[in-house]
Structures are given as structure tokens and as C-alpha cells.
Image (tube, helix red, strand yellow):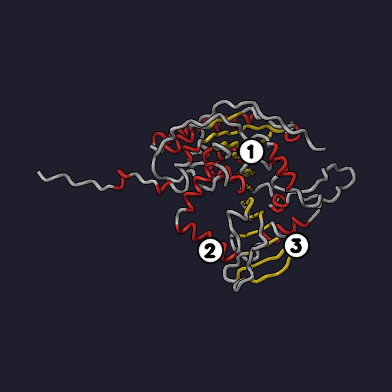
Amino acid sequence: MRPTKPTRPTKPTKKRGAWLAAAMVLLALAAWLMSRGDKEKPTVRPRKIEFPRHPKEAEWERASRRRTLPPLSAPPPGVEAPQWKRDPVLAALPADPRRSAMVFEIEALKESPIMQIWLDCMMSRGNERADAARLKDRYGIDVLEDVERVATSSAGLMVLQGSFEGAKFEREGWTTRTYGEKGILYEEKDTGRVVATWGPDVLIVDPRAEPGSGLVEDAIDRLESTDPAQGSILQEHQAYSDVYGVLSPDDLSNMLPSDQDQLAERIRETVERVEIHVDASEDVAVVAEVAGPAGEEMKNLSKLFGAALSMGRLNAKREGNDELAELLDYARVETETRRPPWESKPEEQRFSVDVALPVELLKNLGPCRRDRRDPERDVEAEPEPAR
């Protein structure tokens, strides 16, 4: 039975303070937020926004529409398991809980204010525009029109969903073979890179070009299998917001600065997973939920997170890194998370790192910030007149 749709959460309080949240946004928004350059400050404080803790009505409908894979086979007698259709992108991702995976809703993101600003800037450059045209000419893929969403995994696998009827890899330099019921594999002879189409709307890529890795073939196996024991690193109820995913404890630890060794070790020992949700429909709102076993360890870990965020902000101000200090001003650690009953476990405890980032700040930290040069820095100092 489908669970009752969650009501909207109560109005959040104004968010402050956070190093780690800024790093998570860096990961979720393609490593653009922490690039260095001009030091400009936002002129507008962020609006009070709804943090993405539950799926919206449109996201419920989007997730339901995407369940096109047949259900898994019936479980053995005495084992209860839901029987419903599955999302092919989530099913194709590796299921190893030690891995991380992120999904970018390209169709939604390109309509968001911040992505429109960044895309307009990037596509105004000759080289980015030429790269996009070259990709469409060589492989028949228009990244801004044909791709609906992109899923990436720390295993190295990428899964794209969209419209790929026009994709072409049959040209000289590629070998072609069928795999499974619906898969067609293309391998580039020179690099070993493997690309596969699975039906007209799924594209699977192993960008690391490691011959014999089997990542693409394994993804197709998962898509076509109905083994009841098969799992997914991302669950159906986690597939909401504009960017979403899970981070492994190891990957989260590796995101911390080198002076946070104690916190990194605590994360590896205590945390079971970190769930990320990013809403970019107006300003950018990020929720990073940290889950682990109930008890004092998780409570102490949340305090360590808060201390690390405060220390990060102080260090940023001391080092003159105004952009990072501004980012940390909009974040906080929230120890009371609200989850629907079907997502909660009595033996589990959570806290979240929340951050609200205004468009006015992000547009000065995006991929085109180097185009906005400080004229005072570019003018060479005139020599003093001779006395």
C-alpha cells in the first residue's frame, strides 16, 4: 500500500554557520562553489525557504512515472518484500553500501535561476559552445535537450536517462556488440572506453576506460535481473529534489580538511550513511542527513560537526577567504530531523546539516567567476614620478 503523502514541513528557522555543508554543495553542484577568484559579497539575504526533507507532489508523480522496470521476483515464503515496478536509473547503480551515488535532475536544474545564470555564461564562451556542438555532431547527443537526469557513482559508473534514439557510436574506431536482452555495447578501440545504450532512453558510461572492468555489463545485468535479493544504493523514497544521493562514511571523511582528523575518524566509526537533497528552484537549499546507530555516539558526533563548522568559519575569516565565510554563515546543524514513519528506524538516529545559499552569492562563485575580473587588480601600478 502506498504511504500517505507527507505534509509540508513547518517553516524552518533562519539557517547559519557551516564548513561541511559548503563542501557537500561543492560535490552536489559539480565542484563549482569553492573555486577561487574575485571576492564579492551578496547583497541580498536568502528568503525563508522550504528545505527538501520530503518529496513534493510533483516529485511523487515524477518518481511514479519513472517506475518502468518489472517488479523483482516474489521472495521466498515467509519473507515480506514489496512488489512494485522499479526505477531503471536507480536499479542500474551499484548496490554496494560502501559506495556513494548522486543523481542530478538536469531537466529541473536547467530551469533553476542559478543554473540559468551559469549556463548563459558558459554557453557565451566559444570553447564551451564548440564542445557541445562537437558532442552532438560526433555522437548525436545534445546534452541540454536530450538528457533528463544523470546518475554518478563512486564506482566510476554513469547512468543517463533521456532521449537517445539519435545516439551514434558506430563510426570507425568503435566495436559494437549486443549484451543481454536490450543492451548494445560500444567500445572505443584506442582508449577502451565503454558506452552502452539500453533501450531508447538509458545511456550507460564507464568514463574511466579501464578494459575489463565490467561496470557497464554489470549495470545491464541489474536492469534485466528480477532476483529478489537485488538491492539498490538509492531507494525509491530517496529520489526527490533537484539533486539527491547518498555518501559513504569514507567519502564523507575524505571531504573534510586535513585538520579535522578526529571528526573524520568518528565518521568512519559511527556513521552508516549520509543522504543528500538539494533544492535549487529559487535559492539553493541543501539538507545532508547523517544516519547512524541510536545512542550517545551520534549525539557527540553532531556536536563535533557543529564545532567543526564554527572553526571552519573562524579560519576562513582569519585567512581572508570571504566567500567561504559567507557560505558558512548560511548553515547549521539540526539535531531534530523529521522523517515519515516508513523511512524511520527505531534503532537509528539522525541529525542534519542544513544550508541555504542565495543566488546572489552563488552567481559570484560559479564557473564563470573568472570572467568578472577586478579592474583594480588588472591595472599595473604606475611608477612614482621621479623626484
Residue 120: x, y in percent?
49, 49
Q: Which comes before the other along the chain, label 3 or label 2?
A: 2
Q: Which of marks 1 and 2 is in front?
A: 2
Q: Can residue 120 be seen in this view?
A: yes
Left or right side of 126 for 232 = right
Label 2, residues with CA under 10 Å away: few <14, some 14-19, many ≥20: some
- Please, what secondary structure does the residue beneath circle 1 have? loop
Q: Which comes before the other along the chain, label 3 or label 1?
A: 3
Total numbered badges shown on the rendered structure: 3
At 51% across and 49% down in the image, what residue appears?
Answer: 119
Q: Do the residues labelled 3 and 1 touch (CB within 8 Å)?
A: no
Q: Which of marks 3 and 2 is in front?
A: 2
Residue 244: x, y in percent?
63, 43
- Please, what secondary structure does the residue beneath circle 2 have? helix
Mark 3–mark 1 distance (CA, rounded to whole Å): 38 Å
At 44% across and 42% down in the image, what residue appears?
Answer: 364
**Quarter residue 343 falls in:** top right
In this picture, is 256 found above or below 336?
below
Label 3 sits on residue: 182
Q: Are marks 3 and 2 in contact (CB under 8 Å)?
A: no
Mark 3–mark 2 distance (CA, rounded to whole Å): 28 Å
At 76% across and 51% down in the image, what residue appears?
Answer: 68
**Quarter residue 212 falls in:** bottom right
Residue 81: x, y in percent?
83, 43
At 83% across and 45% down in the image, what residue appears?
Answer: 83
Label 1 sits on residue: 271
Label 2 sits on residue: 134
Q: Which amino acid does label 2 sit on?
A: Arg
Q: Which amino acid does label 1 sit on?
A: Val
Q: Nearer the viewer, residue 168 or 303?
A: 168
Q: Which of 367 and 343 is in front in this view?
A: 367
